[in-house]
Image: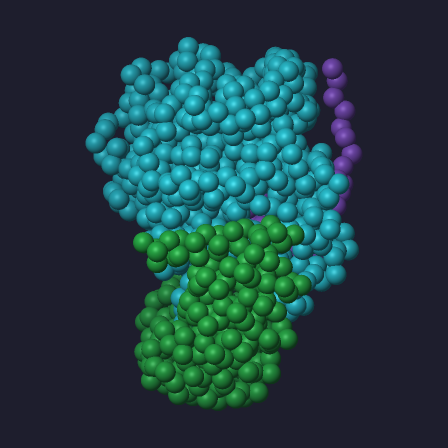
């Protein structure tokens, strides 16, 4: 059976202007228990690559520049 | 390079003690093992990152089971846990916990973990129930993981992040020899030879499906997919009382508890839609959950956590904990719903099912030294069978496991495993990456967990279980033959869903074996609605024998702290029947 | 394949990375040093306290919290007086994690700093160090103009548990700030001397309900608390049920038999929490006069009240049986 992709709005939002992933920071990607954040090869900023979020907050709490915001996933909001 | 591209590779390292799981019990086990023998190599393997992994990734808002001199005694605690767990308890391990846990609190305090203290610097223990006083709040408990990580670095533990252990290795004689693991970002495999292995891999929290339908909106940290239970099973270790499910009270739709333990000491309580308390049971147990479940289904539901009778200043104090520690998005959630605790009660519900001895009693069978039935293999924390452990139990029993495992490693050489076992495991792990076309792990997982809800969730009906097992077997076949993983991250999920499937099978098998009802909602069998002490006052042990799932009875060890009949009666009088 | 283990060579190129022109890069280097767990990192971090970028200094303050001891404390002291609030706040949080008593002498001078925030942060850190030398400066800080500073000073003194501090703590009973009075009452709990109990007793009549609540609770912890039984009984008519609740709990703990009737009259209160507490206390006192009141709540609509009433009746029956035997 062929695969299709599936639209989903992701709960974790990164403010590119504040994110310092391009300077070598990987804090949010490191701390995520579900490993859903990545650094974009295009922008060199962090983003949510997989919608598999426990909305637990380490990414937001540990971000040194306050660039990360965790929202409650839409399905349970 | 494509995202999380798969890299072909296999390497091997060795160590004296391997600890798998860097959440709560794991860091403590690794630390204690290293302090026991500073010359030895201790590896701490973690599927996520030790800095923020496990059930307490954002800390903990309090201890529910602190046995602190002057407030409670080990004897009293052991009695309460025995009664709360319907008598099916090997008391030696519980009693040992109760004796050791205060020392562990002192040690954690020394690490910089913050417990509530009064103005004299003494622990501010709170009374919630009339029998014992066990609650020690942690309003600033958000730094637990930070403090643990600091200790691991100081002790120079070998920390391996983003490696998921998949199977244990054993020698021909049956002794533990190490583990196979896979990198969750590259799919490279790593074999770790070890003289002793400690499993601290948390609850099986991704077993049932939350009512929201969001796969990761689970009560437990969603990374806790029951890998430890599955690994122990495939290694031939016995698992105890898996039919004693975990089900917890939750904020409706949100995965966090409303936290009666935080708000309780301030005077908040669980109430029905008439604003009245309804819970007769005095301890967090299956009996309490049954009362909760019955109330939800009665005309008096929904159920609420009620705070509005408290002074606004008191509510602010409660909020400052609830919205900062353990589940900090709780505040955001309530804000989105427009709920203000001052004027409105918090709607509650019950969680999906899981395995977790931290709150119930379902875990890999261990004795009072945290030893499993496999020589050299240990287990601690939510996945080990010491009942009603909570966070402090994970720390205390992790400590026991670390010390005993290092003693074992010091007196044994490496056991030899068969290279063919590694090759076979590599084939199994990588199989989903070899499929060109198939079903992605998220669909397999959704279907498995939806079936768990439809057929395995209590009340347990034999006919439904039989149907559920048939359906699950069909999905298992799809999983084994047609599951596809296109990158290393999908492979991680594909491996997790295999653990979830194993846990679902174990949950079904164990539940059908025990032909009685016990532990309130956790094991309520409609075909056997009564408790049957004559035939079932025993543990059940599930294990893999000759490739097949089997269950057997095991006698409860003689009590070290006797429980008088009238004490049992006092508790029984509070009970309501399952059929209410 | 690269090593599967976290590196312990974090300090190798630290100096170079800390001198990067871009503050964000310096920040990243500091985060790594903080996580290294290597005590040698402290010296590198200490060199960064005067970094021109406030975000970098904030990161330094956070990273230093991962260590302990005089060297890290010396660096944090400089950051606690930083003009940027984010830096000073991070330094205060980090300093509060320290446990090494040798840090006390380094932090102590800040107790007299011009800024209240600094004085507060210093006192907060000194609390857990429990160092006798901090008593005198903390006693002086009880006269601080800022109430939050006075609260922290009470903590420093209270943690030391020295009888000589009782007169100073007692004087705070008239402090204009309710938080100060509440903390002072709590800090008196340890004292074996009667004047402390007398002071807590006076606080039962405080104008602020939370101070009264604290006093009622603290009397239950103090060795001489039972001397105030009559005053606690008087609290059973307090307009706040929260105060009554704590008074009932303390009276139950002390097993004050003459409190049975006044506690018994609380079993009709609207607030279920209070009824529950009254039933439990009647059980703790276990005087036969409690039975009549407990009979009223044996069928209470609230199960927690019923449970406590049942338990209390058992306690009384057990006591009667002992007396009979």
B75 left or right, relative to C289: left
At which x and y percent is residue B433?
Answer: 59, 20
Q: Can residue C126 be seen in this view?
A: no
- The chain letter of the green chain reads C
In front here: C149 or C255? C255
- Residue farthest to the left, as pictured: B411
At which x and y percent is residue B523?
Answer: 55, 29
At which x and y percent is residue C161?
Answer: 35, 76
Q: Quadrant of residue B354?
A: top right
- The chain letter of the purple chain reads A
Please give the name of the residue rendered at 45% of the width and 52% of the height, measured from the top-left corner. C314
- Residue farthest to the top, as pictured: B546
Please give the name of the residue rendered at 28% of the width and 37% of the height, measured from the top-left corner. B404
B19 left or right, relative to C114: left
The quadrant in which the N terminus of chain A is found is top right
At which x and y percent is residue A26?
Answer: 57, 48
């Amino acid at each position: 059976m062929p695969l299709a992709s599936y639209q989903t709005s992701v709960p974790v939002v990164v403010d590119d202007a504040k994110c310092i992933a391009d300077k070598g920071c990987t804090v949010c990607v490191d701390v995520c228990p579900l490993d859903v954040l990545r650094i974009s090869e295009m922008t060199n900023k962090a983003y949510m690559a997989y919608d598999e979020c426990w909305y637990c907050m380490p990414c937001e709490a540990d971000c040194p520049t306050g660039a990360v915001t965790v929202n409650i996933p839409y399905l349970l909001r | 390079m494509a995202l999380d591209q798969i890299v072909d590779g296999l390497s091997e390292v060795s160590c004296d003690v391997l600890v798998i799981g860097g959440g709560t019990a794991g860091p403590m086990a690794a630390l204690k093992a290293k302090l026991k023998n500073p010359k030895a190599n201790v590896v701490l393997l973690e599927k996520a990152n030790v800095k923020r992994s496990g059930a307490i990734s954002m800390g903990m808002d309090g201890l529910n089971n602190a046995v602190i001199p002057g407030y409670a005694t080990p004897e009293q605690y052991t009695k309460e846990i025995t009664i709360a767990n319907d008598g099916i308890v090997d008391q030696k391990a519980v009693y040992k916990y109760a004796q050791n846990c205060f020392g562990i609190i002192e040690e954690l305090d020394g690490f910089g973990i913050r417990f509530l203290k009064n103005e004299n610097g003494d622990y501010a223990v709170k009374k919630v129930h009339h029998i014992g006083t066990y609650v020690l709040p942690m309003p600033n408990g958000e730094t637990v993981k930070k403090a643990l990580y600091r200790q691991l670095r100081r002790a120079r533990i070998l920390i391996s992040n983003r490696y998921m252990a998949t199977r244990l290795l054993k020698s021909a004689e049956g002794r533990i020899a190490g583990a196979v693991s896979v990198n969750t970002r590259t799919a490279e495999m790593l074999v770790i030879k070890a003289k002793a292995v400690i499993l601290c891999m948390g609850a099986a929290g991704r077993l049932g499906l939350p009512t929201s339908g969001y796969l990761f909106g689970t009560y437990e940290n969603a990374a806790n997919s029951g890998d430890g239970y599955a690994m122990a099973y495939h290694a031939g270790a016995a698992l105890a009382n898996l039919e004693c499910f975990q089900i917890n009270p939750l904020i409706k739709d949100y995965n966090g508890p409303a936290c009666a333990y935080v708000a309780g000491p301030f005077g908040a309580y669980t109430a029905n839609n008439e604003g009245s308390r309804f819970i007769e049971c005095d301890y967090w147990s299956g009996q309490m959950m049954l009362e909760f479940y019955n109330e939800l289904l009665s005309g008096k539901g929904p159920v609420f956590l009620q705070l509005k009778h408290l002074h606004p200043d008191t509510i602010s104090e409660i909020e400052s904990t609830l919205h900062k520690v353990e589940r900090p998005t709780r505040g955001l959630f309530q804000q989105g719903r427009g709920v203000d605790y001052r004027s409105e009660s918090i709607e509650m519900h019950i969680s999906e099912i899981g395995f977790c001895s931290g709150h119930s009693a379902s875990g890999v069978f261990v004795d009072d030294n945290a030893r499993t039935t496999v020589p050299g293999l240990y287990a601690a924390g939510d996945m080990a069978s010491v009942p009603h452990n909570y966070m402090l139990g994970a720390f205390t029993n992790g400590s026991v496991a670390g010390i005993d495992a290092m003693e074992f490693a010091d007196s044994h050489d490496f056991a030899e495993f068969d290279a063919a076992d590694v090759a076979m495991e590599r084939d199994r792990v990588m199989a989903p990456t070899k499929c060109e076309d198939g079903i992605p792990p998220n669909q397999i997982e959704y279907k498995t967990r939806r079936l768990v809800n439809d057929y395995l969730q209590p009340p347990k009906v034999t006919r439904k279980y039989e149907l559920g097992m048939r359906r699950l077997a069909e999905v298992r076949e799809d999983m084994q033959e047609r599951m596809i993983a296109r990158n290393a991250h999908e492979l991680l999920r594909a491996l997790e869903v295999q653990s979830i499937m194993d846990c679902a099978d174990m949950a079904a098998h164990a539940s059908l074996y025990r032909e009685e009802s016990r532990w309130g909602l956790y094991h309520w069998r409609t075909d056997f609605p009564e408790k049957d002490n004559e035939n079932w006052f025993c543990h059940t042990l599930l294990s893999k024998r000759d490739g097949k799932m089997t269950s057997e009875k095991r006698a409860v060890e003689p009590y070290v702290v006797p429980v008088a009949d009238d004490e049992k009666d006092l508790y029984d009088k509070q009970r309501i029947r399952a059929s209410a | 394949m690269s090593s599967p283990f976290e590196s312990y060579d974090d300090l190798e190129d630290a100096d170079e990375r800390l001198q990067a022109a871009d503050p964000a890069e310096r920040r990243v280097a500091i985060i790594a040093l903080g996580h290294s767990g290597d005590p040698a990192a402290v010296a590198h971090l200490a060199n960064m306290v005067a970094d021109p970028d406030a975000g970098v200094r904030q990161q330094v303050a956070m990273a230093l919290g991962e260590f302990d001891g005089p060297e890290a404390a010396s660096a944090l002291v400089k950051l606690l007086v930083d003009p940027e609030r984010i830096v000073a706040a991070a330094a205060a949080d980090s300093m509060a994690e320290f446990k090494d008593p040798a840090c006390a002498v380094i932090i102590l001078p800040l107790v007299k700093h011009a800024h209240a925030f600094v004085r507060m942060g210093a006192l907060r850190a000194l609390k857990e160090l429990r160092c006798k030398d901090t008593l005198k400066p903390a006693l002086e800080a009880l006269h601080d103009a800022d109430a939050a500073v006075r609260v922290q000073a009470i903590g420093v003194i209270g943690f030391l548990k020295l009888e000589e501090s009782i007169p100073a703590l007692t004087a705070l009973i008239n402090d204009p700030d309710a938080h100060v009075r509440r903390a002072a009452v709590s800090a008196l709990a340890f004292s074996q001397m009667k004047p402390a109990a007398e002071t807590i007793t006076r606080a039962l009549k405080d104008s602020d309900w939370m101070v009264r609540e604290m006093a009622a609770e603290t009397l239950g912890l103090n060795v001489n608390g039972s001397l105030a039984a009559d005053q606690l009984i008087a609290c059973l008519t307090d307009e706040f049920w929260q105060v009554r609740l704590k008074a009932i709990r303390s009276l139950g703990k002390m097993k004050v038999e003459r409190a049975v009737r006044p506690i018994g009259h609380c079993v009709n209160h609207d607030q279920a929490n209070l009824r529950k507490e009254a039933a439990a206390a009647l059980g703790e006192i276990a005087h036969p006069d409690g039975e009549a009141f407990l009979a009223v709540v044996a069928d209470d609509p609230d199960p927690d009240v019923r449970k406590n009433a049942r338990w209390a009746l058992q306690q009384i029956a057990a006591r009667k049986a002992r007396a009979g035997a």
